[in-house]
Image (cartoon, grey):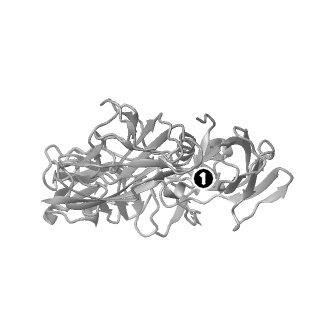
Amino acid sequence: MPKQLARRWLAGFGVVGVLLAASAIPAFAAPAVEDLNFFAEDVVVAPGGPAKGSNLFARPRTSNSEWGEYTVKVDRSKVAGFADVRDANSAAPCTESGAILTCKVVAEENDYYTHITMVDLVVRAKKSATLDQQGEIKFTITDSGGGSATYHSSVSIGEGVDLAGIEQRLELTGPLGGTLDVPLTVANRGEKAVNSVVLYFEGGYGYGPSKRYKNCEYSPADAFRHAFACRFPNTIEPGGAARLDSSFGFTVPTDDPAPNGHSGVARWFTPADWDEFQSFNRARLGQQGTEGELRLEPVGLQSRSRQTDVKDQNNGTGMRLQVSGDQGAEVAALVTPTTATGEVGATVALKVGYVNNGPAAVNVDGAKDLRARTVLSLPSGVTAVRVPMTCSSHGDWVPGKLGAKVYHCIEHKRLAQGEKMGYEFGLRLDEAGTRAAQVQLTFDAGVDLNPANDSAKVTIIASADGGSENPGGDDGQGGGDTDGSLPITGAKAGLTAAIGGVLLAAGAAGFVATRRRRNRFVA
């Protein structure tokens, strides 16, 4: 999706006897390094095993910053005795001087949030490396103003093992509310014992955990996909295998759209590889289970060093779930208030969104789910000066952009029947008169059971000589609502214009600084 991020600074000033304050939008400067958060993967590599990536990422601590240019020095001296660390970014290679890599970085924003890749590295264990050697890569980041910050990631030498998922593909079927037995087996195809394992699963909404075990942690309750990780202390000898006990399975949620299809994957890790995976992917887990302990039981056929899987391509089990039934969802547009009134120059609040009238959940992950997008169209004479970061301007798709006329709002949050999604805007009334704004629901996937209530209007009245700034209006229902209120989700990028005195400016000067960014997504 194309993206162009524009930051505006409008400075108006003139003197005809009186110097007056004019409305202004604050400038946004490239963040200094102390305003950035950094993270990089910790890696475990084995002699004779595959190379791994260790990339440095950054994100600003606020959303109101432009990106800039930085210098990154990579100090490899602490790991040079046992690991080769090289620049993997052939498009913009770093220069090398002894143990130091020097990389010039032009930071570019991605399509979704503000994570960017600053340095791409590839790490390989030397043949002479010995188990449990460990050191740190030091990153020193300098901004264009001379500010500096440091970050470290670790490189460890581990014992090479080979875990494998026995079931490479599972085809599952079930009705709404049905429970599915899922045999998952891990084998040790290497020459050394594996001293413990971690199972990670991620899949569509239909894969509801039948039980939540105390040795597993799970994704949040409102997630649109299911994910969990379970730890097992089992030692699996070379040639041996172990299977999840018979209590394990999935239960299809009763509010899943149906018929439906869901994909999923289960993957086995060594504990060290799981820590490495987490340092990069940061899976949204954290809810510990309480329903007993999930066990791995031997089905056939000790080392205590850190272990890393040298053939991780065979660790996963792909799954496909077909859910039977006939169940859809119906959503209705909401706007609060339906009449917004204020004086010219005032800013009025407007909440838009929708309610899920059910019976199926919406915004879940599956082939037949209903995924709703709220589109707000504003008339002339009205300017958006407060916009959620979950809403993007039409055409250039900039999250939180001020002053656009059409916004597309979407958030990946599951909504059960009766729940609402809402987005709050601040609209400045620039010209006197009565106008209408339009809210329209569109759908990225699925079919709404009742399209008749997928739109709503709000009347905007700007008076030159006074008026209520933000009346309550009516209940704002497009259908199926009870009180018209909307929970507000997403971060807000706000701006309040200050107007002072009588404008007698003889002239005004201004410019729009527009910066086009090439986008890059970081998981």
Residue type, numbered disc 1:
Val
**Toward which corner of the image does residue 149 lie, by quadrant?**
top right
Q: Secondary structure at mark 1?
A: loop
Spot occupied by residue 499 in the image (x, y as percentages of width and height): 46, 49
Spot occupied by residue 89 in the image (x, y as percentages of width and height): 69, 63
Compare residues 68 and 380 and report the one nearer the observer. Answer: 68
Spot occupied by residue 162 in the image (x, y as percentages of width and height): 55, 50
Crowd class of label 1 (few under 14; some 14 to 19; many from 20; radius 10 Å): some
* Residue appearing at x 69%, y 41% in the figure: 152
Residue 517's place in the image compared with 352, above or below, is: below
Compare residues 177 and 348 and report the one nearer the observer. Answer: 177
Residue 348's place in the image compared with 231, above or below, is: below
* Residue appearing at x 58%, y 56% in the figure: 13
Circle 1 is placed at which residue position? Answer: 310
Compare residues 404 and 171 and report the one nearer the observer. Answer: 171
Number of marks present in the image shown: 1
* Residue appearing at x 38%, y 44% in the figure: 243
Q: Residue furthest front?
A: 301
Compare residues 482 and 121 and report the one nearer the observer. Answer: 121
Relative horizontal placement of residue 391, taking residue 467 as reference (left or right)? right
Spot occupied by residue 351 in the image (x, y as percentages of width and height): 29, 50
Tell me if residue 321 can be seen.
Answer: yes
